[in-house]
């Protein structure tokens, strides 16, 4: 799967994805990641990517020409959908990540300032995606979240495919407490059921714990 990121800060992406399972997948050629400098598609000597908003208001808006032309330059290499990282977009979740992982690639546009000229969305048929109801300094960190969540679902990226089935949110009954050696540490012990070898009891315990954890989280959201 190929990821192309359009950003004014392309150097941010290399260090993040040099490590871990995504970094190893890039080394093996299972995943491609290319970060492109938006300023290379400007037409003035100042390499300006933003301007004042029509209608007035604070801040600056990213210009349509460099963004659209940057994406158009990538179409031959990446036929996947165009994604705009916007705080008001549809919420990224595990189900959406799984759908996106089936695409041949993604072209991700990282907004800055007060947003991107809306003609970008309409001209490119872009899909707007958010990682949460809060505002960050730009779309680069949300783009990294999207890439990580999607890339790890590409076949061959995660060494043990069975572990993906146990991911939180992959199944409504996952998210139980996990333990490993030592069985006792500073007076804290692993629940006896996990040491019993009784797989039926262990499965039942895990489902109960997952249900309790989810119920507790829902109560916290109400407060």
Image (cartoon, helix red, strand yellow):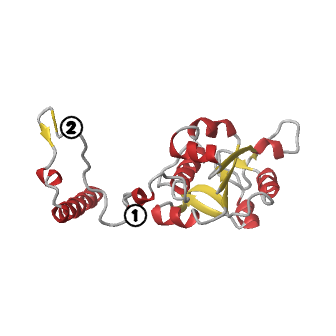
Residue 74 is drawn in which quadrant? bottom right
Q: Compared to 74, does 113 lie above or below?
A: above
- Seen from the viewer's position, the closer of residues 54 and 34 is 34
At 40% across and 63% down in the image, what residue appears?
Answer: 170
Residue 206 is drawn in which quadrant? bottom left
The C terminus, quarter of image:
bottom left
At 79% across and 52% down in the image, what residue appears?
Answer: 70
Helix, strand or loop for disc 1: loop
- State which tag comes first along the sequence, 1 or 2: 1
**From the viewer's perspective, is 62 left or right of 41?**
left
Rendering coords of residue 72 (x, y %): 81, 58
**From the viewer's perspective, is 14 left or right of 62?**
left
The N terminus, quarter of image:
bottom right
At 67% across and 55% down in the image, what residue appears?
Answer: 2
Q: Which residue sits furthest front?
A: 197
Q: Are marks 1 and 2 in contact (CB under 8 Å)?
A: no
Query: Viewer-nearest of labels 1 and 2?
Result: 2
Q: Compared to 12, does 2 lie above or below?
A: below
Helix, strand or loop for disc 2: loop
- Please rate how many residues cluster around mark 2, counting C-alpha atoms within 10 Å: few if below 14, some from 14 to 19, many from 20: few
- Seen from the viewer's position, the closer of residues 181 and 77 is 181
What number of labels is visible?
2
Rendering coords of residue 217 (x, y %): 27, 57
Judging by the rendered image, the residue that carries numbered circle 2 is 182
Judging by the rendered image, the residue that carries numbered circle 1 is 170
- Seen from the viewer's position, the closer of residues 42 and 160 is 160
Rendering coords of residue 136 (x, y %): 54, 45
**From the viewer's perspective, is 42 left or right of 25?**
right
The CA distance from mark 1 to mark 2 is 28 Å
Rendering coords of residue 28 (x, y %): 62, 46
């Amino acid at each position: 799967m190929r990821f192309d990121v359009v950003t004014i800060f392309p150097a941010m992406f290399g260090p993040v994805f040099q490590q871990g399972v995504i970094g190893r997948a890039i080394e093996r050629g299972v995943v491609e990641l290319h970060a492109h400098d938006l300023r290379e598609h400007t037409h003035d000597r100042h390499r300006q990517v933003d301007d004042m908003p029509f209608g007035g208001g604070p801040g600056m808006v990213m210009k349509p020409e460099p963004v659209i032309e940057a994406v158009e330059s990538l179409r031959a290499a990446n036929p996947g959908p165009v994604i705009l990282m916007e705080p008001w977009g549809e919420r990224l979740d595990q189900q959406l990540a799984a759908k996106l992982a089936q695409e041949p690639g993604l072209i991700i546009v990282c907004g800055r300032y007060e947003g991107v000229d809306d003609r970008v969305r309409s001209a490119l048929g872009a899909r707007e995606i958010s990682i949460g109801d809060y505002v960050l300094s730009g779309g680069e960190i949300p783009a990294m979240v999207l890439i990580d969540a999607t890339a790890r679902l590409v076949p061959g990226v995660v060494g043990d495919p069975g572990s993906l089935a146990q991911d939180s949110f992959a199944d409504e009954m996952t998210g139980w407490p996990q333990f490993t050696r030592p069985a006792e540490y500073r007076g804290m012990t692993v629940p006896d059921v996990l040491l019993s070898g009784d797989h039926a009891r262990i499965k039942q315990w895990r489902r109960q714990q997952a249900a309790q954890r989810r119920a507790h989280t829902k109560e916290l959201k109400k407060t």
